Image (spheres, rainbow, N blue to C red):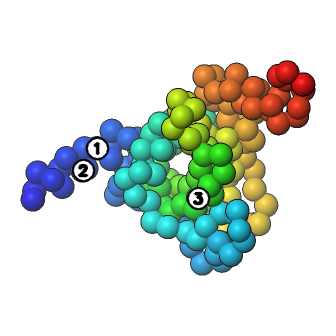
Amino acid sequence: MRFGFCSSLVSLLALGVAPGAIGVCPSKEGSPSGGLAGGFGSPKDVDEEVQKVISEAAAVKAVVGALSRNGTNIDGTALKACWYTSQVVAGTNFRVMMSWSDTDQRWVEVTIFRPLPYANATAEVTGVAIKSSSSPSTTGTTAAAAAAAQPHTAAAGAHAAQRGSGTGGDG
């Protein structure tokens, strides 16, 4: 039993998000309840699958970069994944709420897209928004800034934008 806990802890630490990190998590209450067809679902606790998606998308690196650009420097090991919502599209969109401090009343909403398995592509961060309990406004990055934080996704994002605009392909 004790070895199972230790191996789980080592696995979570290897994924880049500390399971016991101190952080003020935003409340799940008041978040959309998932009532719209095709929309994001109800908030859920972070599980092993979402931890793997966070790791695959290098979300910690994207969050640390976004916070740094906004004047907040943190060590990535301070990040805590609080909860998430998901939306099934041609793949899955995840919105993961992350926190880094027990005194800062801000948190980060990270949007990650995981393509369907047949696409043979990795999950990627498509947005990072820094949110605050004291203000409904947010500061953050869009898909372009997230792509800049992760150079390997820039070409994929441009390709997706081109497909979506109808300007690329066989017309």
Would residue 50 be seen by someone viewing this image from the given angle?
yes
- Report the Cα–Cα distance between label 3 and label 2: 24 Å
Three-letter code, disc 2: Ser
Judge from the rendering whether residue 31 lies leftward or rightward of residue 20; answer left or right: right
Tell me: 77 left or right of 63.
left
Among numbered discs 1 and 3, the one appearing first in the sequence: 1
Tag 3: amino acid: Ser
Q: Is residue 25 left or right of residue 136?
A: left
Q: Position of residue 62 (x, y in %)?
A: 59, 37
Q: Nearer the viewer, residue 61 or 33?
A: 33
Q: Answer yes or no: do the residues labelled 2 and 1 have beta carbons within 8 Å? A: yes
Q: Give residue 116's quadrant in the image.
A: top right
Dot 2: what SS? helix
3 and 2 marks in contact (CB < 8 Å): no
For residue 22, above or below residue 152: below
- Residue topped by disc 1: 11
Q: Amino acid at mark 1?
A: Ser
Q: Position of residue 121 (x, y in %)?
A: 55, 30
Which label's residue is closer to the chain start, 3 or 2? 2
Q: Residue at x 50, y 67 (%)?
A: 44
User: In terms of secondary structure, where does tag 3 sit?
Assistant: strand
Query: Eyeballing the image, is 22 above or below 77?
Result: below
Q: Quadrant of residue 169?
A: top right
Instruction: Count residues near mark 2 (Cα–Cα under 10 Å), then give few for <14, some for 14-19, many for 20+.
Output: few
Q: Disc 3 designates what residue?
A: 86
Residue 8 numbered tag:
2
Disc nearest the viewer among 3 and 2: 3
Locate the C terminus by quadrant: top right
Counting other residues with Cα less than 10 Å from the Cα at mark 1, is it few (<14), some (14-19), or many (20 or more)?
Answer: some
Tell me where residue 111 appears, x and y as whole percent.
Answer: 63, 49
Task: Please tell me which residue is depicted at 19% across the width and 47% down the height of the picture.
Answer: 7
